[in-house]
Image: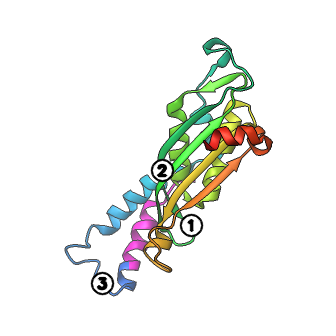
Amino acid sequence: MAIDIDAIREHVRGILIALGDDPDREGLRETPERVARMYEEVFEGMNYTNHEIAEMFDKTFSERVEFQQTEQDMVVVKDIDVFSYCEHHLALMYDMKVTVAYIPKDKVIGLSKIARIADMVGKRLQLQERIGSDIAEIMQEILGSEDVAVIIEGTHSCMTARGIKKNAATTKTYTLRGKFKDDRNLQLRLFA
């Protein structure tokens, strides 16, 4: 499904009119086009399913060649910056930090690919909970391993800039799969 730039342009113009402004005035004349291009960029992830994202970033290495794995091995990538938009208000979810952890089985993924996966998943109309779920699902498919964890902490402008206006409020979500779901010692290591 491709993003319909022409429809976005037309609807943004209609929103400006509905707000009581003149879309033909100098400052707004190019706004529909700018918003349409911005939406094409920030919602790029909507063009792809989780499976397609997994195929896009499926660059793995045999872990047996790289290092000798033990039951205690865990790979953790922390503080991946992600921006997304809340599907309820189209409001920005910002200052989001994503942590992705996994236990290697037969292969490991290039570290930059983990950040790219998180970024692409964020480029959708989303819920923070689903971002974690989507990242975990994609990682599981690529790695062939159930043992994946995703932790996200973020701020939501639908809570900070409108409504209740609590600008210090952050939301933290945990998506724990495989051994991360049941192994308390593994959880303690991850959360440390």
**Among the two numbered marks 1 and 3 on one chain, the one whose residue lies closer to the N terminus:** 3
Q: Magenta stretch containing residue 103, yes or no? A: no
Q: Does residue 106 lie above or below 97 as drawn?
A: above
Question: Which structural element holds mark 3?
Answer: loop
**SS for tag 2?**
strand
Indicate the amino acid at tag 3. Asp
Q: From the viewer's perspective, is the residue at label 1 or at label 3 nearer?
A: 1
Residue at the spot of label 1: 87
Residue 7 falls within the magenta-colored stretch: yes
Mark 1–mark 3 distance (CA, rounded to whole Å) = 26 Å
Residue at the right extreme of this rendering: 182
Determine whether, in the image, residue 178 is placed left or right of residue 76. Answer: right
**Drawn side of residue 53 relative to residue 15, left or right:** right
Which residue, given by chain and number where applicable, does mark 3 sit on?
A: 21
Which residue is drawn at the image coordinates 63% and 37% (left, top)?
101
Instruction: Assess disc 2: are there few (<14), some (14-19) or many (≥20) residues with their C-alpha within 10 Å of its C-alpha.
Output: many
Mark before the other along the chain sequence, 3 or 2: 3
Q: Going by the image, does 69 lie left or right of 42? A: right
- Judging by the rendered image, the residue that carries numbered circle 2 is 82
Q: Is residue 102 above or below residue 105?
A: below
> Residue type at mark 2?
Val
Disc nearest the viewer among 3 and 2:
2
Q: Residue at x 59, y 57 (%)?
A: 172
- Start-end of magenta stretch: 1-15
- 53 or 86: which is nearer to us? 86
Q: Amino acid at mark 1?
A: Glu
Front one among 5 and 127: 127
